[in-house]
Each structure stands twice: as C-alpha cells, then as structure tokens.
Amino acid sequence: MLDLPARSQTGAQAPALAEALARHAKFTGVAALPWRGFGLAGRVLAVTLGFILLAMGLFYLTRLVAFREMWLHNKIAAAQTAVEAFNADGATPPPADLSRRILNSVGVKSIAIVTPAGRRELVLPGFSPDAAEAIAADDSSYFEGIEATFHALFAARGRIVKVASTTLPDQAAIEVTFDETPLIEGLWRVSHNFLNISLTIAGVVTCVLWAALWSMVLRPVRRLTSNIIAFGESPQDASRVIAASGRRNEIGRAETALSVMQRSLAHELAQGKRLAELGMAVARINHDLRNMLSAAQLISDRLATIPDPLAQRLAPRLVATLDRAIQFCQSTLTYGAGRELPPSRRRFDLSELVRQAVESAQAESGEAIDYDIDIPPRFDLYADPDHILRVLENLSRNAAQALMAKGAEDGRPKAIRFAAIRTDGLALIEISDTGPGFPADQAARIFEPFHKSTSQAGAGLGLAIAADLVTRNGGAIALAPAKADDYYCGARFLIKLPTPEGAARKAAHILPEA
C-alpha cells in the first residue's frame, strides 16, 4: 500500500505524495527510468521468435534426417535396378567393361549381391571394399538418425562408406560402396536452403509481430506508464488525468479504470487542500471569535438583570446560545489540534429541540415561511442533542434559503414540515418543504463537502456536516424521493436515529450476560 500523507497537511501534500509514489515505484521496480529498447514487447518478441526458431530447428533436424535416409534408399534402389537390368546377379558374372559401366551409372565403387547361395561383387578396378566404413540406411531411433546425419554432415569429403539394404533371410540383399561426398554436399545444400528460408520467415515474423506488439501492447502500455509517472509528479493536477482510448481489450479497460481512479484522487486531493485551508482559516477566526463571544456573554449577563419581562424571557435563551457558540468554537479548535471529541449521547425530547430550531429559523426568515411541527410531545431520542440541533438548523436553513431564492412549487405557500414516528427501536424523522427540490443530477452528491445545493454564497458544508453528525450518533440520513401527491413535494430528508429503548436493546444484545 502507498504511504500517503494526511489530507489535512496540504502544505507538503503534493511533494509528500510524489515521494510516496516514488517509494512505491522503487519498491515495485517501476521507477521513472528512461525507456530501454528491450522492454515488455521486446521480451515477448524474443520469446516468440525463440519458439519459432526452436520449432523450425526441430523441423530442420527431421528434414535433414529424412533427406539422408531418402538419399541412401535411392542409392540402393538405383543399384538394384541396374543389377536387374543388366542381369548382373546371374550365374555368369558380366564382363569387366560392363561391370564398370554399371557402377559408373549408379555412382558407386562396388555392388555386392548377397544371396543364400553366396556372394557376388561388381568392383571397380583397383578398389577394395574392405576399407569402406559401414553405415545404416535406417537407424533404430530418431536420435541415432540425428547423430548419423550430423556425422555425415561434418565428415571429410572423399570418405568411402558402404550401406546394405534390409531384406528377408530368403531374399537377395544389395550392398553398395560409394564416395559420400555427394551426400555431404546434398546435406549442406539442404542446410543452406533451410537457413535462408528460416531467416526469411523469422524476418517477416519479426516485422509483423513487432508491428502488432507495438500497436496493441507496447504503445498503450508505455502511454499508461508515462501517464502514471506524470500524474504521480502532480496528482492534484486534473489536466494530467489519462484520456481513455475506448479500447475494448484489457488495456482499454485498464485505461478507463485508471482515468476514474485519477479523477477521484485529484478530486479528493483538491477537497483535502480546500478543507485544510478552510480548517486553518476557521481555526484563526474561531480563536478571535471566542474572545468576542466571551465579551458578548458578559453583556448578556447584564441584560439578565434588566427588570423588563421580555428581556427576562429572552436573556436565558441568549445566554444559552452564546454558551453553545463558545463551546462550539472551543471544540473547533480542539478538532484542529487533532483531538475530536465523541458525541455526548443522552435522552432528550425531540419536540423541544425542533421548537428551538424553528424559533432560530423564524428569527432569520421572519414570517415569510410557515413551519409545521408534526411531532408528538415527549418524543425521546438517544443522541447528542447539540449535534441533532445543528443538524435540524442546517436542514431548516437550507430549506428556507431554497424557498426564499426559488419560491414554492405550484403557487403553494412557503412551508417547512417536521414529522417523526417510532419504528422498531428507531426514530424516523422527516424534514420536507414545498420548494423546488433537488435536480436529478445533484441528488447523489448533496452530502459531499463543498457541494453548494441551495446558495452560492455559502461554503457548501451544511449537508456534509449534517450527514457526519448523524452518522457519529449512530444514525443515517438520506434524500428521499418527493411524493407528487403530497402537499410538501419539495426536498424530503429522512433521518434515522436510535431511541432510548432501541439503544438499551442494542447494548443488552452486545454486552455478554452476567
């Protein structure tokens, strides 16, 4: 696995990632080295040509052995035909002149006819058959034939050999003695011709196979490798993402998969960089904002001493809001230091929490939007109430911004509804509105960071933060399809959160019995 740097450390992120990719390339042997001539395609070509030459070599051996055996059989057959034509195997030996002409016509030094009755020879004057080396026309095995063929191929010219035909015991046998030079020259002629043919075939196969490998393998693989190396040098640069060629083979599918992976990585790195920059800015702002809120808290404490009934009623709520803001600023700074606090889950009333979120929303939007709360009293949940309040405020604020910016559908009043039911140890919370809803192409990405779904003025983090808070409290959030026949036909968010009964049942199921 790649030892990738942390997403929050963007200042050294790209160099660190490039260094990690370089370490990975060094570990796997795919370093960014100059191209060598004997690469993958060259090895495949060499192996292919090696097998071709091996096959042709075996065929050459078989062809050479067969040529020698055929040549010897033809020599014996010619001698037998000449003996029978001139009746040289009769009781009376032919004259010396006729014997010489028979031997010269066949191209041998002597011919011996061996019968059960005896042996008769036709010999050139001055030649002794006993000095000839005996060879066999038919060898007992393939390897013995190869050995005899190469022995003849590299023998000295002018060597005299004798060979006999194999016949039945009651039949005459022919034994001829001859100069092996014509056979040696024939073997070398076959070898030269076969070598020329082999080189021609190897050359044609090399050109065709190299062109095919270059077109189908080498060039696409080099393109993949070059792109991986170039992308590893600057993975946050989306312009270096490989463009898939659309091939339907394995390399084409690899290009498509690499393109998707690179786009995803570039997108993640861009988001990581933006999150790191945003985190640094938020940490600096919160550091100063915490001091400002502390001063505001002192002023709110002074407001609590005013005898005005309205001030007496609003001052505690203002103090609680300022306390929550200060605590949130502190938790943000704590999170920036790398110590994220877990949610503080406890039992609380959802209806009261929704009422607080609606009051905050009405303070922002005024009387332009109606809020409908369809939640029974004492609807208890088991989660962090501060986290759930932030979720409700984010969702209601997004719905209010969409209604104020785009209006309601079909001339309906601008309205937002909060509803909840219990089912199987879970609470199902629905937040819907009469707005235009989300376009189909945005519905799958609304919970991603920096996806601005309602207003271009925000940071695009509201829904991402809401989804993270719900998940951390053991729940789930989803965008449900709108109901065409429902009055609230705009955006519908469904949130599942555990109830106290469901949380207790789950804890009893997980913990072992005493």
Image: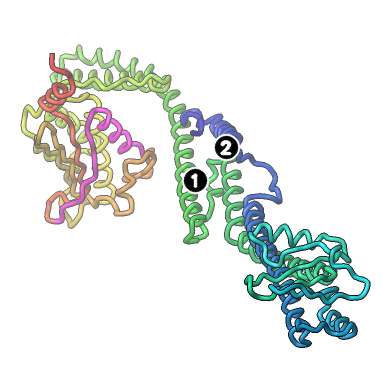
Query: Disc 2 on helix, strand or loop?
Result: helix
Give how far apart the Cα atoms at labels 2 and 1 are. Answer: 19 Å
Q: Position of residue 338 (x, y in %)?
A: 41, 21
Kind of residue indicated by mark 2: Thr
User: Residue 388 lies in what quarter of the image?
Assistant: top left
Please name the residue that numbered disc 2 is placed on: 28
Q: Position of residue 508 (x, y in %)?
A: 13, 21
Q: Is residue 210 visible?
A: no
Q: Is residue 40 visible?
A: yes
**In the image, is 308 to the left or to the right of 230?**
left
Q: Residue at x 19, y 25 (%)?
A: 383
User: Residue 152 lies in what quarter of the image?
Assistant: bottom right
Q: Residue at x 63, y 74 (%)?
A: 170
User: Residue 387 lies in what quarter of the image?
Assistant: top left
- Front residue of this view, candidates 329 and 384: 384
Image color mode? rainbow
Query: Where does the magenta region start and end?
Result: 460-484
Q: Residue at x 68, y 42 (%)?
A: 33
Residue with the most extreme right position: 126
Q: Position of residue 110 (x, y in %)?
A: 83, 74
Please name the residue that numbered disc 1 is placed on: 262
Query: Disc 1 on helix, strand or loop?
Result: helix
Kind of residue indicated by mark 1: Gln
Vertical order, 509 against 371 (above or below): above
Q: Residue at x 61, y 38 (%)?
A: 29
Q: Check if mark 2's residue and mark 1's residue have beta carbons within 8 Å.
A: no
Locate the C terminus and report the quarter of the image it occupies: top left
Q: Residues within 10 Å of mark 1 (few under 14, many from 20)?
A: many
Q: Is residue 276 magenta?
A: no
Q: Residues within 10 Å of mark 2 (few under 14, many from 20)?
A: few
Which mark is first along the chain, 1 or 2?
A: 2
Vertical order, 242 against 207 (above or below): above
